[in-house]
Amino acid sequence: MSQETQNNNALLIHLSAFSNLFIPLGNLIFPIVLWHAFKKDSPYVDHHGKEAINFNLSFFIYFITILIIFIASLVGVIFNLFQMNELNNPDQVFEILFSSSGTFISLFVLILLVIFKFVLIILAAIKAGQGELFRYPLTIRFIK
């Protein structure tokens, strides 16, 4: 396999993570399928495939965890709002503001996580296309 083909296959594996924009869990399924198809052809492609899979699995776990925190915070805010409307106690305003900060913080972290993921996938694809090895930061190494 030529170096250009290896670079293109590695680039394709990284960019396949964007398939989740059209297919649920595509960011996990397509890199696995492509890595499995190309990993025997080249250690270079094998490296990039493992990196892409580990990264997408790690960020899936991070996203779900923060999403659970966001939903729990939101439920708390909604519960407090219903409680405040029933009791009409002005002292509960501080409690509601405090509980809503968790909602805003977790939403902010979710947005940052999505932006960070997008930028890293583009950076990894560029490096793969140029024939360079790339290691994603903040990644749990499930596949070694």
Image (cartoon, rainbow, N blue to C red):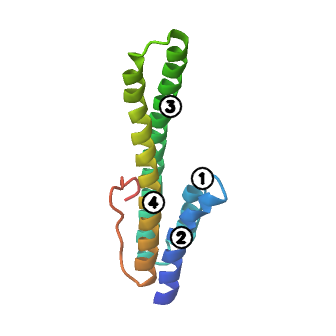
Quadrant in the rendering for residue 26:
bottom right
- Numbered circle sitting on residue 115: 4
Using the image, determine if residue 85 lies above or below residue 141: above
Quadrant in the rendering for residue 73:
top left
How packed mark 1 is, by other alpha carbons closer than 10 Å (few <14, some 14-19, many 20 or more), is: some
The residue at which mark 3 appears reads as: 74
Q: Amino acid at mark 4?
A: Ile
Q: Nearer the viewer, residue 16 or 90?
A: 90
SS state under label 1: loop
Which mark is nearer the camera, 3 or 2?
A: 3
SS state under label 2: helix
The residue at which mark 2 appears reads as: 15
Q: Amino acid at mark 3?
A: Leu
Q: CA distance from mark 1 to mark 3?
A: 25 Å
Q: Which percent across, then down, holds residue 67?
A: 49, 40
Q: Amino acid at mark 2?
A: Leu
Q: Which percent across, then down, holds residue 30?
A: 59, 62
The residue at which mark 1 appears reads as: 25
At 50% from the left edge and 9% from the top edge, which residue is drawn?
Answer: 87
Q: Nearer the viewer, residue 134 or 3?
A: 134
Which mark is nearer the camera, 1 or 4?
A: 4
Position of the C terminus by quadrant: bottom left
> Nearer the N terminus, badge 2 or badge 1?
2
Q: CA distance from mark 4 to mark 3?
A: 22 Å
